[in-house]
Amino acid sequence: MRSPRALPLPLHVDTRRSLFWIPRRSQYSLIILTGVGVSILFLAASYAEWTSHILSHPFHDPFRGPPPHHQEPWMRPERNVWQERAQTVKAAFRSAYASYERTAYPHDELTPMSNHHSDNLNGWGATLMDGIDTMILMQLDDLVEGALVHVSKLKLDRNTNVQFFETVIRYLGGLLSAYALTRNTIYLTHADELGMRLLPIFNTTSGLPPFSVNMHTGTGGMGWMGPLSILSEFASCQMEYRYLAHLTGRPEYVQTVDYITKFLHENTEHGGLFPLLFATSDGAPSSDRFSIGAQADSAYEYLLKEWLMTGKTEPHFLEMYLKSADAIIENMLYVSPSRHLLYVTDVLRPSLRPVHDFQHLSCFLSGLFALGAATIPDVDPRHAWAAEGLGHTCWITYADTVTGLGPEMMVFPQNGTKWVDELAAWEQRGRQGVIPGVNEATPVTEGESTEYRVVDSRYLLRPETIESFYIMWRTTGESKWRDRGWALFEGIENHAMLGTAYASLADVRRIPAPHTDELPSFFFAETLKYAYLLFTDEELVPLSQWVFNTEAHPIPIFTWSETEKRLFNIRTPQGNKNSTLLRHLP
């Protein structure tokens, strides 16, 4: 694939709303918006402003290198080893995708034990749609060509209900990323249509979307939680819709999802935590706990990433993220008594009493803290410490098992101590010894206690741990994260491989490990992508230029033009860096 720098500039024609965006090589772009019976002609921001990201940020830029106090990994003798490992991941993707294509396409996912398929994600070919940008980054050009044909024939006007959350992060995110990496307008045209067809789901009395929406009628539908909206599901669409607005000029995209940010701000508890569930009818909170795992994770993730995505120009996202990060650090991080493992637990609402569980899903938090520590000026050093400690604990939960793969959920029956209390005691001792929770506990040997009890022993081919390893590697330059990522991938190769495909494990504590009949699309979109990026010496997706959505679809960093700010009612500070949060919320 050619880099975006070599691709022609796009001509986007939205026939449903007659929006023509015609960039040309002059100082200014002409944007013509035609409504019903009304034509508005206005002068946009400079062409250089609009295209500054695309022309200067190709996805195949060389890695600038880790911090200077680390030796550059590619200067070590084992450089070719990492190139070979990246190629091994690429071969794994091709093999597993060939199995899907041979047995399950055009359905959503392969069921590898029964050699059949499932259609739990709309029946639109989720494995293909979720994996397009991975194909592009791996330069699997033949697969990309086939995927483009599939997308061009995809019909979205169907009288059927689709899950809003999964459709946004997998399909919409995948289409937007594919467009950003190739500039092929087929992806953008379908992304725009998909965004418009999903948008009526917000037409509720509270403004919160229910579980699903009919793609033809726009009618919302309840899901497994009934009349409740789930935090992670309604608060993980802002990145996708805001970038789509930047590409299409549609103000309704920004205005709709910015209401979600305002809702979160108005429903913050304990300084930065959000309840897991809200009544769809009136927005009233309706849950008994706070979590960073299931039903919550990406809502917190998107606060930081929205700030990064628009070039750090909208401080209210950063302010909300920092408040949430502080609340998590103060209330949800604990250290086990003997191995001193740092973990994040659910806490009850409103008492904040810890449950002392630890979910695989929560392992994304290490990478999120690392990303914040690397991008936020003068940030609290606890963010970097937490990133290190949580990343190590996630690694330990893998290394402690005979398969080298981590279980879905654990509990710490001996509870442990709140991390901030351990830090306070360490400060009183004059910071003697290692930072609490940031030690290098070693994997257990036979007969030793892990200090946690596995309550769900499945490994679902999830990406959160290797995602954090990737971000830790890119932000710190420490090669141990690469080594741990390779050990993780070897566990997948040794125990999750099933024929030419892969399957989730029913129990990571047994050899041979029993499988379950599923190969999720996120294995292609996230797990293999992060593994490939971790082992590739070149930084194919520079973190200074791209931001990953929660399904690992990279979105380019951009800044709003003055025209967009007026059109979308984007309020950015004018010289006052201490402006309040509320001043910038719509």
Image: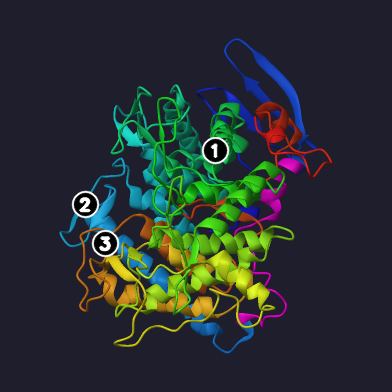
Front residue of this view, candidates 183 and 252: 252
Q: Quadrant of residue 253?
A: top right
Tell me the kind of residue under disc 2: His
Front residue of this view, candidates 556 and 482: 482
The image position of residue 396, as x and y in percent, is 42, 76
Residue tagged by mark 2?
Answer: 117
Q: Which mark is residue 331?
A: none
Residue 68 part of the magenta-drawn span: yes
- Direction top: furthest residue: 37
Which segment did they paint magenta? Answer: 49-73
Q: Quadrant of residue 561?
A: top right
Front residue of this view, candidates 485 and 21: 485
Tell me the kind of residue under disc 1: Leu
Query: Please, is residue 173 above or below residue 5 in the view?
Result: above
**Alpha carbons under labels 3 and 2: distance apart:** 11 Å
Residue tagged by mark 3?
Answer: 99
Q: Report if residue 471 is visible in the image.
A: no
Tell which circle, 2 or 1, labels the residue nearer the N-terminal end.
2
Local packing at callout 2 (Cα closer than 10 Å; few below 14, some 14-19, many 20+) is: many
Q: Which mark is residue 264?
A: 1
User: Helix, strand, or loop for circle 2?
Assistant: strand
Tell which circle, 3 or 2, labels the residue nearer the N-terminal end.
3
**Alpha carbons under labels 3 and 1: distance apart:** 42 Å
The image position of residue 492, as x and y in percent, is 33, 72
Q: Tell me the residue at 69%/48% (across/down).
A: 311
User: Helix, strand, or loop for circle 3?
Assistant: helix
